[in-house]
Image (spheres, rainbow, N blue to C red):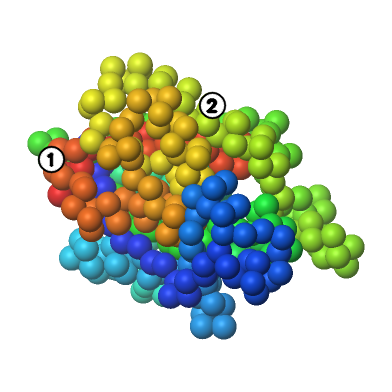
Amino acid sequence: MKAAITATGRYFPAREVPNSYFYDDLGLDTNDEWIVSRTGIETRRLADPSKGETCSFMATQAARACLADAGLEAGDLDAIVVATVTPDQPLPSVACFTQAALGAKGFAFDLVAACSGFVYGLDVCAAMVESGRAKRVMFIGADHMSSILDFADRNTCILFGDAAGAVLIEQVPDDHPGTIHRSLLRADGTGAKHLQIPAGGGRLPIDEGILAERMHKVKQEGRVVFRHAVSSIVKVVRQYFEEEQLDVEDVALFIPHQANRRIIEAAADRLRVPRDKTVITIDRFANTTAASIPTALDLAREEGRVKVGDRLLFATFGAGFTWGAQTITWGV
């Protein structure tokens, strides 16, 4: 049996927040030129919890769009898997909330790999389908990053947006043109200190001191993360190409995690991927963590950039550190 992505969907909150919000409204020591030159971000979408825009809400909306694309109902799903680091609450999972909202059945669980969540989860879901343990899996990358940002820290709060992207992974016959190819996944836990939320778990439960120090919010050493991200993505893609006997010319589109435009362009240049083959959405939506690759894929389809038989390359890097590369062949 083989697995393929047969449908996609996305959800972005309606609230559009330009760079000026951070210096005009929040009074941070930054400006548009500083943000754009260092990140490539011009605007982003932020959820409005007062309107119910939680992580599970966004995941549900993306899943509904994906089901509509597939022409299926929620009852046709065997499983729902959500990659996220921003659950509505510690338990139950976002996947369970999403299952209930959709009226679906089957099993449901979350997966945590930060910005690498989509590539990690795609491999897990494809393996379940290939093994026959599930025939149809709704896999969603969703993150409500604004819920864990320190909006007094100009180095992190400007980087992220909120979104959800969904893909339907199905068993397909051997003669189907689409397939999910093998992945190459990596992790290095010694890098945890460079990108983390230090408190809020069992090691440092939240108390007044934690709240005062804002240790329950994202902390990042930007220069360290930037350096590791570029080198790790380049190395893993080169190794992937070597093991799969691929060349850049074999790839129709490069859809990387949207962390920073400079990271994307530096990696693409070292890999010799042309700009017209590189999907960039960070300028409009910022870094949406596990949602960045599936939303970029859905947008690329809408723009007519994905055709049957195209081999698409996904590459990512995130907290953990985690990183990896994977390709799919598009078949619908």
Q: Quadrant of residue 328?
A: top left
Q: Depth check: 108 or 325 in front?
A: 325
Q: SS for tag 1?
A: loop
Q: Residue furthest bottom?
A: 50
Q: Amino acid at mark 2?
A: Ser
Residue 65 location (% of width, % of height): 29, 67
Does 204 sit left or right of 131 as displayed?
right
Q: Position of residue 234 (x, y in %)?
A: 46, 26
**Dot 1 amino acid type:** His
Give the left or right position of residue 328, taking residue 196 as reference.
Answer: left
Residue that extends furthest to the front in the rendered view of this protein: 33
Q: Which residue corresponds to the image point at 67% horizontal and 52% vertical from the top-left?
A: 155
Which residue is found at the position 48% from the left and 59% from the top?
A: 42
- Of residues 75 and 66, the one drawn nearer to the viewer in this rendering: 66
Query: How many angstroms separate mark 1 from mark 2 (CA)?
Result: 35 Å
Which mark, by number, is residue 176?
A: 1
In this view, 159 is above or below 123 = below
